[in-house]
Structures are given as C-alpha cells and as structure tokens.
Image: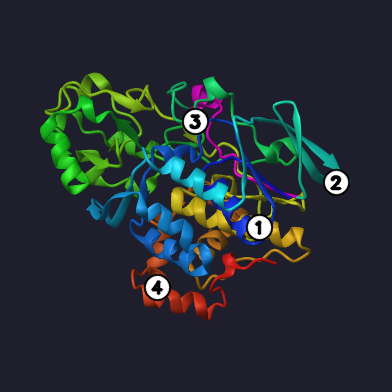
C-alpha cells in the first residue's frame, strides 16, 4: 500500500502515478477538496511549462494532462513575460480530478488530518489521521510548505484566510517532520523567511461589466496603474519570481481562471477601489487579499534526485516539499516521479531519477545540487521564468515542438514510463 499525504497537485499526481504502476494507493487530504492552491492558481503551459507538461504526457501521464486541458477556459494566452499559457477553470477542476483518481482505484480520504506517524524498525509503518491508523508500505509527503497560521503571522501579515483554510481544518502537519527528519526553510526577500503566494482572486461580479467582458474575451486584461500607486515593492515578496517583472509593477494584470486572478500577492482594497473598473472590487481568496497572502517554503524536506527523503528509506516527497519549486506543473512533475518511485520501492525495485536530458529531470537535479551547495534556498525554481527558465533555454530544453519532445523522451528510454505497472 502506498499512502500519499496531501491532496494538492503534487499529491494527486503521486497517487495517479503510483496507481498506474499497479500499486494500491490511499490519498489523505485534510480539507474537503483536492488540489490545494490549484483551486486558485489555474495557469498551465506558460513558457517552459509547456515543454514539461508534454514530457509528462510522453512519459505516460497523458490522461492527466488531457483532463486538465479539457477544463481550459483559454488556450495560447500571452501576457507580460509569458507565452502560450493555458488557463484552466478553477471552479470546475476539483470534481473532475476527484472522479479521475477514484476511477483509477485511488482510495480518497478527505477531511482526514494527519496528526502523528507510526515507526517500526526504523521505517514508517503508518500514520494517525483523526485518531485512526492508516498503515502503508511506502509513503509520499505532499503536505506542502505553506502555513500554519503561526508562520503567516510571524513572517507575513497574519492569516489572510486563504484556500488552505487552516482555521477551519487545522494547521498543516508535515509528515517528514513528524517522522523526525529536520526540514529546511527558504530564505525570504522582504519576508524574513519563505515567500508570499503570488496572486489573489477577485469576484468577477464585483468588477465593472466592461472589465469582465474584456477579461473573458481574451483571457487576460492589463490595466495601467497611475504613478502614485505603482506597486514595485510588492514584487520581491512573491513566491512566483517569474512574475517579478516591471510590467507587473506598473500594471494590474488579470487572468481569467473562472475568477479574476490578480497577479500580485496582495493589493490594498481601498487603493484598488480608486482604479477605474475596480470601484466595487471584492477579494475572493485570500479574503484578506488587501493585506497579505499565505507564506510558503517554510518546511522543505532534505531529498535526493529520486525524491527519496534523506534519513528514511520508505518516504518520498513531492511538490514544494522537495525545495523552492513554484507552480502546478512543477508539482505534477515531482508528484509523478515520487509516486512512481514509491511503487518501485514497494515492488523491490530501485528508485530512479529522471535524466538531465529532460527538463523534468534537469530542474530537479539543478535544484537539489544548488541546495546542497548552500545557495539553493535563496532562489525559486520554475519552468516559466526566473533562474531555471533561463537555464532551460541555455540548455536548449525549451521547445513547443511536440515531435521534438516525443523524440527526447523516447531517446532517453522514458516513453510510457509512468504507464507501466510492475
């Protein structure tokens, strides 16, 4: 039995990958919905994420990718610094993914909050969730790095009432930490540690009809800011440093993901309402989006390139637990590998790493090597910008040519990897 703890994009991908490898899988999520920050994100395929998602398809994850694509509101959207993005509908995606995993045989346990672990002979043997034992052979920690509330108060601006809903469902509990493994914290910019989530969502009904029409027609709207309220000082706080561009300081950039996604970690409501079209604006998530957002990268697990947590053989990690990775695609990539390796270990096989000839493998190798050098926790890693996208282009790993991507995966011997059961 593979037990995945945490039902964000990383945990869902790990559960899917392990199930495709022939394992029995149980996925535990502390809230009443899957996907975590994927319920407010909605951006796929921008810049190098296009390449990475198609690599995952070629490696056997095509069903999952197609499910995501089918919920798209807009495709091939360009916005400052980003090309060919797909914007999926955050209001529709969760039940689709829930049904998809159930049909793959994954046992879903929602509102199942982990509180402790069971150790036997130096290995994890189970977890305690809501006073019940859930036993397993191999585990995947996809509990994330955001929160709990105390961290948002200490390093941010307090609880912003975000989609993670710690006051309702309890604070995040790290499987890695409960197992006795010391975790790491990313170094902050303007936050003293970690980084704030990079966007907010606005209720479309609170915006001017003309603004909503423009947004829904093209998927993106750019509203210039008056000089008196340009927000350059907010950019350094963003977890999503691929959006740390001049255009995001000089404009309000909205994306249509079902809600109106405002590409800034926060924006004071009283100032926002002085801008044409935003006179009646109201935040949907975080509800205190005028003052702050969730603080992330507070609990990173020590791991190797195969995503096996250092110090415990039968524990893997995925998503932000692996390091300061930013984005849904990055969570899916690490989730697919962690779930696959968990199934391999359960069947007595050695875990693998993805080769550096792929963008999916290289981002993990590069991030892990940078962390081991002692400098990696100062940067954020994403296929769509910042440090890693520049590396991706330099190594000629970035492409939107599907034939080229298929050849790359076939040449590395990875064709259909995640679709093979043991």
Q: How far apart in space, not on screen, are marks 3 and 4 (Cα)?
A: 37 Å
Neighbor class of circle 4 (other Cα within 10 Å; few <14, some 14-19, many 20+) is few
* Lower sequence index among marks 1 and 4: 1
Q: How far apart in space, not on screen, are marks 2 and 3 (Cα)?
A: 32 Å
Do the residues under discs 3 and 1 have CB atoms within 8 angstroms? no
Q: How many marks?
A: 4
Query: Which residue carries the number 2 mark?
Result: 122
Residue 103 located left or right of residue 261:
right
Query: Which residue carries the number 4 mark?
Result: 396
Is residue 28 inside the magenta stretch?
no
Q: Looking at the picture, how far across and down is residue 150, in whole percent? A: 56, 22
* Lower sequence index among marks 2 and 4: 2
Tell me, yes or no, if residue 361 can be seen here: yes
Q: Which mark is residue 304?
A: 1
- For discs 2 and 3, the disc positioned in front in the rendered view: 3
Q: How far apart in space, not on screen, are marks 3 and 1 (Cα)?
A: 28 Å
Query: Which residue carries the number 3 mark?
Result: 164
Start-end of magenta stretch: 138-155
Residue drawn at x 50%, y 63% as measured from the top left: 360
């Amino acid at each position: 039995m593979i037990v995945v703890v945490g039902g964000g994009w990383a945990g869902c991908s790990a559960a899917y990958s392990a199930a495709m490898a022939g394992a029995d899988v149980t996925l535990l999520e502390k809230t009443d919905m899957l996907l975590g920050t994927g319920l407010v994100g909605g951006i796929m395929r921008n810049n190098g994420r296009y390449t990475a998602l198609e690599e995952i398809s070629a490696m056997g994850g095509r069903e999952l990718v197609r499910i995501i694509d089918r919920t798209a509101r807009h495709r091939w959207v360009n916005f400052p610094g980003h090309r060919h993005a797909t914007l999926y509908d955050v209001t529709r995606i969760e039940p689709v993914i829930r049904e998809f995993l159930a049909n793959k045989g994954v046992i879903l346990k929602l509102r199942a909050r982990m509180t402790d672990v069971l150790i036997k002979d130096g290995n994890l043997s189970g977890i305690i969730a809501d006073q019940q034992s859930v036993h397993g052979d191999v585990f995947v920690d996809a509990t994330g790095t955001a929160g709990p509330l105390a961290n948002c108060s200490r390093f941010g601006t307090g609880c912003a009432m975000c989609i993670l809903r710690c006051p309702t469902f309890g604070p995040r509990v790290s499987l890695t930490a409960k197992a006795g493994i010391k975790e790491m914290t990313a170094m902050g910019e303007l936050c003293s540690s970690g980084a704030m989530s990079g966007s907010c969502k606005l209720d479309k009904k609170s915006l001017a009809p003309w603004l909503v029409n423009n947004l829904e027609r093209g998927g993106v709207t750019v509203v210039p800011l008056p000089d008196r309220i340009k927000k350059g000082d907010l950019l350094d706080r963003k977890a999503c440093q691929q959006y740390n561009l001049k255009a995001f300081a000089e404009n309000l950039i909205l994306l249509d993901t079902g809600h109106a996604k405002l590409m800034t970690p926060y924006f004071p409501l009283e100032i926002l309402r002085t801008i044409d079209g935003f006179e009646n604006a109201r935040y949907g998530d975080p509800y205190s989006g005028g003052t702050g957002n969730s603080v992330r990268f507070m609990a990173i697990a020590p791991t190797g390139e195969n995503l096996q947590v250092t110090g415990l053989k039968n524990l893997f990690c995925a998503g932000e637990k692996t390091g300061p990775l930013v984005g849904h695609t990055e969570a899916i990539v690490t989730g697919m590998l962690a779930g696959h390796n968990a199934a391999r270990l359960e069947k007595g096989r050695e875990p693998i790493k993805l080769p550096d000839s792929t963008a999916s493998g290289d981002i993990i190798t590069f991030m892990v090597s940078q962390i081991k050098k002692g400098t990696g926790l100062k940067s954020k890693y994403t296929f769509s910008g910042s440090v890693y996208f520049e590396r991706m282009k330099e190594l000629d790993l970035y492409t939107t040519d599907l034939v080229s991507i298929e050849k790359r995966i076939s040449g590395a011997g990875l064709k259909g990897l995640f679709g093979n059961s043991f």
